[in-house]
């Protein structure tokens, strides 16, 4: 079984977090059925910075399913953390809640985990210094803000998905579906991804 952590931040895209969880749940069902497997393919958990629920920007509450310190994921998916239309004057405030996670993300990468971001989750990876020498993508509306803040990074906002090997970025908020399909194929099989 492969451990997957979905990181939810305050003001996140709550349906994206729940959608990723749903996608991996479907992958578990699809992975069991044809092969008669008894164990799920993925152990997918939602984590937050302080192990407490967060409120998404729609008002929906996202509740962690485990304590971050008790879980060692092989894949960490950073959900959308900054509204795509947010201005530079609000960026610091919206990124502040993610700072305590930067060390954890770096440790995960050093331990061998794959990191993925959805939409503006790429800002979190950039802030943590994890996109240096990588190619990134983000929501097209956030691209000017990303370029202004990280002029040294290579951004390709017209790409839906960018795979650097151990760091993967997906574009807009609903790109989580494409990302999940790609990840299920990578960590399971094309057949399971297609069945999802």
Image (spheres, grey):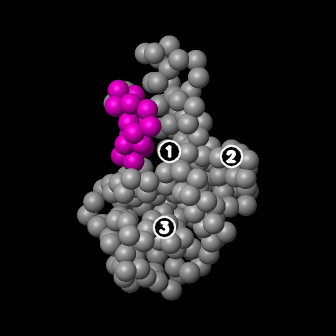
Was residue 185 drawn as part of the magenta stretch in this picture? yes
Which mark lies nearer to you, 3 or 1? 3
Residue 191 appears in the rendering? yes
The residue that label 1 is drawn on is: 20
Which mark lies nearer to you, 1 or 2? 2
The residue that label 2 is drawn on is: 71
The residue that label 3 is drawn on is: 130
Kindly indicate the quadrant of the structure image that contains residue 42: top right
Q: Which residues are magenta?
A: 178-193
Query: Which secondary structure, mark 2?
Result: loop
For disc 3, the neighbor class at 10 Å (few under 14, some 14 to 19, many from 20) is some
Q: Residue furthest left?
A: 158
Question: Which residue does the image show at 60% across and 36% down from the upper left?
Answer: 43
Q: Give the image location of residue 112, x and y in percent.
A: 53, 51
Give the side of residue 11 with respect to residue 114, left or right. right
* Mark 3 / mark 2, whichever is N-terminal: 2
The C terminus, quarter of image: top left
Give the side of residue 77 with respect to residue 145, left or right. right
The span from disc 1 to disc 2 (Cα, nearest Å) is 18 Å
For disc 2, the neighbor class at 10 Å (few under 14, some 14 to 19, many from 20) is few
* Mark 3 / mark 1, whichever is N-terminal: 1
């Amino acid at each position: 079984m492969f451990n997957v952590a979905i990181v939810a931040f305050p003001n996140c895209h709550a349906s994206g977090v729940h959608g990723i969880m749903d996608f991996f749940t479907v992958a578990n069902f699809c992975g069991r059925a044809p092969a008669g497997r008894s164990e799920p393919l993925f152990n997918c958990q939602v984590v937050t910075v302080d192990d407490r629920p967060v409120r998404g920007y729609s008002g929906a509450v996202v509740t962690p399913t485990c304590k971050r310190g008790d879980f060692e994921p092989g894949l960490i998916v950073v959900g959308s953390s900054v509204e795509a239309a947010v201005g530079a004057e609000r960026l610091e405030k919206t990124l502040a809640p993610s700072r305590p996670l930067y060390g954890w993300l770096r440790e995960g990468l050093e331990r061998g985990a794959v990191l993925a971001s959805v939409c503006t989750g790429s800002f979190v990876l950039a802030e943590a210094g994890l996109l240096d020498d990588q190619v990134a993508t983000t929501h097209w509306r956030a691209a000017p803000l990303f370029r202004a803040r990280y002029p040294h990074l290579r951004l390709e906002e017209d790409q839906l998905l960018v795979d650097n090997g151990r760091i993967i970025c997906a574009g807009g908020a609903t790109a989580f579906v494409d990302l999940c399909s790609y990840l299920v194929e990578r960590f399971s099989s094309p057949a399971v991804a297609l069945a999802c």
